[in-house]
Image (cartoon, rainbow, N blue to C red):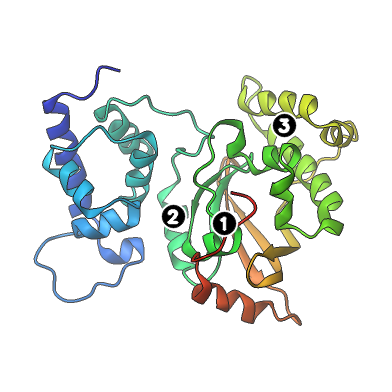
């Protein structure tokens, strides 16, 4: 990479501004607020949605910023509800390689992001079929921990489940065996659904067969089952055990899923999930980090 030219910086800024101006606040789950003097979103709103500082985003739009990282480009694409073509164009403007689908920078369909926005009080996130977290709402971060910092094979929660003991602290120990079996059956179904030329799932499976005797034994059972809905117990480091229903909405090609968590009837989970918005992520250290 030779770095961005001044012309690329200016084009990047102009493109970001054009995409920002076409979006209404309601499109991204923001209140309309008082009368606006400019079309679309404000710069500070895009910065907030993308997890960037206002000063940094202002520099990008002015065409004077530094070369944005792959993660920042993906965050901006989601904040601005870019189509797949627009997102790829943004990567090329920033002189970054367009990442293959499946990693943390994968494109998320705007419709799925719209649904995520409408689940504001419900823990929800979008993951890939290999359990790589792509985007979480704040309540999901409070419940499950921030999953955005993992790269490479570790980006998959299934990979961490079988290779990193701390990942299992999210679930009570008596539930580990059932979770392991469900993860393996789901992975087999997801791998079979992919194109025969796909290498991502096959590479992950080969690595886990070597790294984990438990995974190898379960893989030999040939169980196949997508996780469409699930009842599970999660351990929150502040609130304790929370019993939830985990529901899935699959994308058309099956490569991505919108997960959301609802309280189990007859338990105190509803009150605990409400407390998540109060507890937030302050002073909470999740074992999965």
| Residues at marks 3 and 2 touching, judged by CB atoms closer than 8 Å | no
Which is in the foreground here, disc 3 or disc 1?
1
Please determine whether, in this image, residue 211 is positioned above or below residue 150.
above
* Spatial separation of the CA atoms under disc 3 and disc 2: 26 Å
Please determine whether, in this image, residue 260 is positioned above or below residue 161.
below
Secondary element type, mark 3 = helix
Please determine whether, in this image, residue 261 is positioned above or below residue 108.
below
Q: Which residue bears the numbered disc 2? A: 113
Of label 3 and label 2, which has the lower sequence position? 2
Closest to the observer, 143 or 185: 143
Closest to the observer, 127 or 115: 127
| Visible residue check, residue 18 | no
Q: Which residue bears the numbered disc 1? A: 145
* Spatial separation of the CA atoms under disc 1 and disc 2: 19 Å
Which is in the foreground here, disc 3 or disc 2?
2
Q: Is residue 120 left or right of residue 239?
A: left
Please rate how many residues cluster around mark 2, counting C-alpha atoms within 10 Å: few if below 14, some from 14 to 19, many from 20: many
x and y, in percent, of residue 171 in the image? 75, 58
Q: Residue at x 44, y 55 (%)?
A: 113
Closest to the observer, 163 or 247: 163
Q: In the image, which disc is placed on residue 192?
A: 3
């Amino acid at each position: 990479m030779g770095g961005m030219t001044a012309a690329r910086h200016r084009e990047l800024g102009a493109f970001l501004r054009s995409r920002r101006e076409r979006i209404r606040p309601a499109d991204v789950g923001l209140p309309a607020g008082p009368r606006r003097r400019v079309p679309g979103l404000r710069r500070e709103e895009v910065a907030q949605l993308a997890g960037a500082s206002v000063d940094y985003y202002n520099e990008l739009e002015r065409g004077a910023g530094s070369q944005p990282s792959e993660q920042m480009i993906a965050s901006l694409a989601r904040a601005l509800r870019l189509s797949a073509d627009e997102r790829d164009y943004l990567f090329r403007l920033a002189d970054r390689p367009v990442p293959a689908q499946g990693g943390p920078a994968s494109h998320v369909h705007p419709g799925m992001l719209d649904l995520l926005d409408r689940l504001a009080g419900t823990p929800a996130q979008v993951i890939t079929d290999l359990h790589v977290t792509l985007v979480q709402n704040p309540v999901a971060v409070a419940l499950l921990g921030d999953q955005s910092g993992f790269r490479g094979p570790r980006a998959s929660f299934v990979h961490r489940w079988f290779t990193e003991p701390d990942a299992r602290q999210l679930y009570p120990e008596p539930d580990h065996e059932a979770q392991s079996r469900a993860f393996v059956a789901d992975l087999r179904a997801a791998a079979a659904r992919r194109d025969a030329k796909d290498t991502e799932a096959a590479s992950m499976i080969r690595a886990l067969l070597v790294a984990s005797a438990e995974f190898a034994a379960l893989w030999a059972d040939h169980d196949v089952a997508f996780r469409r809905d699930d009842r599970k117990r999660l351990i929150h480091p502040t609130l304790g055990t929370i019993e939830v229903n985990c529901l899935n909405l699959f994308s058309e090609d099956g490569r991505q899923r919108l997960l959301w968590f609802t309280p189990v009837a007859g338990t105190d989970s509803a009150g605990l999930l409400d407390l998540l918005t109060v507890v937030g992520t302050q002073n909470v250290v999740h074992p999965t980090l």
